[in-house]
Amino acid sequence: MNGALSPSYVTLCLLGGGLLGWAYFFLLWLTARATPRVQRPAVLLVVSFLFRILVLLGGLYVLTRGNPVGIFAALLGVMVGRRVMTRSVLRRTPAERMGAHD
């Protein structure tokens, strides 16, 4: 079987994409929480975006090496990672989402 189409390769790309997606959206959530507390929110937003997109695209390249099947599996994983991250944040109480602790 072709290495690019092996189940282990596709699974690796799917799981790696999920981890990258989770990290991307977790960092986005942290940025959104920090924005009201900084002096220059625009700088934070730009730097955060550049960091997140570089990590995501770099991770996708390292993971897939441009293989179309790998890219598809990894992007599917990114969408799953987004869903997992979103659900984990929504399970928290509003106070926990905003960073307040008892």
Image (cartoon, grey):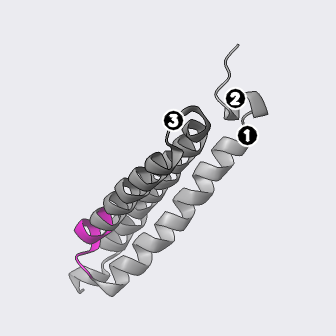
Question: How many residues crowd mark 1 within 10 Å: few (<14), some (14–19), many (20+)?
Answer: few
Amino acid at circle 3: Gln
Q: Give the image quarter of residue 97.
A: top right
Image check: 61 left or right of 10?
Answer: left
Q: In percent of the image, x 52 and y 34: which residue is there?
A: 38
The disc labelled 1 sits on which kind of residue? Answer: Arg
Residue 32 placement (x, y as % from top left): 59, 45
Residue indicated by mark 3? 39
Tell me the CA gap for discs 3 and 1.
30 Å
Q: Secondary structure at mark 1?
A: loop
Look at mark 2 in the image and give the residue it sits on.
Answer: 96
Q: Quadrant of the N terminus?
A: bottom left
Q: Is residue 28 above or below residue 5?
A: above
* Mark 3 nearby-residue class (10 Å; few <14, some 14–19, many ≥20): few
In the picture, the disc for residue 91 is 1
Q: Is residue 23 visible?
A: no
Q: Secondary structure at mark 2?
A: helix
In three-dimensional space, the C-alpha distance between marks 2 and 3, rounded to whole angstroms, equals 23 Å
Q: CA distance from mark 2 to mark 1?
A: 10 Å
Name the quarter where the C terminus is drawn: top right
- Quarter of the figure with residue 53: bottom left
